[in-house]
Amino acid sequence: MTAPAPPAGSTAAPPTTASAAGHGSPAGTPAARPAPPGSFGAFVAAARHAGRLVVQPRMGMSDPRAMRAGLAATRAADATTVGTVTLDSYTRVGDQTAARRALADGVPLNGYPLVTYDTAVTRSVLHGIQDHAFPVQVRHGSATPQDIVTALLLAGLDATEGGPVSYCLPYGRTPLTVSVENWARSCELLARARDHGAEPHLETFGGCMMGQLCPPGLLVALSVLEALFFAQHGLRSVSLSYAQQTDPAQDEEALHALRRLAEELLPGLDWHIVVYTYMGVYPRTPGGARLLLEESARLAVRTGAARLIVKTAAEAHRIPTVPENVAALEAAARAAEAETARRLPAATGPTAPGPAACHPTAPGPTPLRAAAGGPAPGPVADTGIHAEASALVQAVLELSSDLGRALPRAFARGYLDVPFCLHPDNAQRSRSYLDTDGRLRWSAVGGMPLGGVVELARAPRLTSGGLLTALRHVERRADAAALDPSPAHRPLDDGHRPPAREAHSEEGR
């Protein structure tokens, strides 16, 4: 498989050889370009070298003082953290008039209205908090992000996330071709921040499409394709996302597949992998929420991911408070530290450093586990996720060397088809279901080029009740494990592995 050449006018050089960018290179391949000191990518790379998982909240408040307090609390957490400024819904859809009206009327928004506020206001929010030891990322959800990128750059920020597919299909009816053009301009605008001494960072959201019930092979492919799109349009520091799904063993295999494809297709780039704690229906009990969060942290460590987006125990009920976000950050950090110590026994014992000593910017000796950069990902069973993702990526790349053309064509032909996604540009012929082991599987692939790659199982007809049951699978599993810690309800990341490539069906699914 070869990566596409950049379109005419692009500032990115075409990838030529494979590399484990930012994480050590295989023999015979060039080392990736390291991110410059002070950048988002450099901070994450330093944390990984120190054996530390970077943890990050979802956080956005419309009041500047509250936003500043949230960032300050995130920075002060007993964990290696980066900050988040999540934008409001009006800003996401470009309705600045409504955002201004809400602010004038004193109506709280569901995020920070970055474009509406004067640049000086945002700079005052960040002053004395954001620096090389605490980078801040803007999160938004927009298919028209040009004004957002302009505003964040003016405020002194240079890290954000999204993508032409992942911030289009699930969020509205913006035509995919329009979103692709908007994101091409935005990437190029962000890339020009290098002219002012910054190394901008862009994270894909493709590994989180619809949040749930999307088989992992498609998530991996979309995350890789969006990263390639970013590179074509001038970005040299990227992260690839993957959202925790329904089965830890399947997730582990998917993350290994994501890493393999990134090593092959993103040589010369600074890149890392970011895991999202489960984005679907969340456990209703505090214990279930804690178990699921800890499970995602262990998953990130086992697979060599560098960053984790956390969720809180309040997710099933309301928007979390700042203290609840901090508690989730610290709980995830503790779980990651324990998993790292378990996988690297030599680093444990009374002399092992605590979280503060392992902060990537902390002075003093490097902890013992830093020599290895944290535990290396171990081998996993192969049920075909890498082959599936590879087939999808290759099919798209063969449509055009310009991903701005290839992506819309792929969806128009059904080569990419997201289950349960109602966007007009999605073919809506693919179907997925949850088997009796809790693994996501295809029951129909539509026009996706997966013949001979995916083993289709005969799933029962999916009813509305069966869909709701599947959507609540993770919630029920985690809550049951919290209420009854017997082996029957144990977490699934404790060594249990369902058999590979078996066809299963489940009544009512």
Image (cartoon, rainbow, N blue to C red):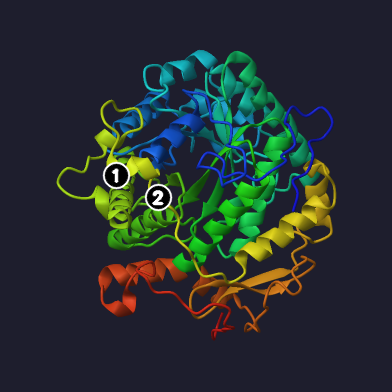
At a point 71% along the width and 74% down the height, the residue shown is 444
Left or right: residue 378 compared with residue 95: left
> Hey, which residue is sitting farthest bottom in the picture?
507
Residue on which disc 1 sits: 330
Left or right: residue 89 compared with residue 278: right
Q: Residues within 10 Å of mark 1 (few under 14, many from 20)?
A: many
Given residues 162 and 390, the one toward you in this image is: 390
Residue on which disc 2 sits: 311
Q: Please state which of the two labelled residues, at mark 2 or mark 1, is closer to the viewer.
A: 1
Q: How many marks?
A: 2
Note whether 488 is above or below 20 in the view shown: below
Whether residue 472 is visible here, answered yes or no, is no
Note whether 240 is above or below 32 in the view shown: below
- Label drawn at residue 199: none
Q: Secondary structure at mark 2?
A: loop
Q: CA distance from mark 2 to mark 1?
A: 11 Å
Q: Which image quadrant is residue 325 in?
A: top left
Q: Of the residues shown, which amino acid type is indicated by label 1?
A: Glu
Mark 2 near mark 1, Cβ–Cβ under 8 Å? no
Q: Which image quadrant is residue 395 in?
A: bottom right
Q: Secondary structure at mark 1?
A: helix
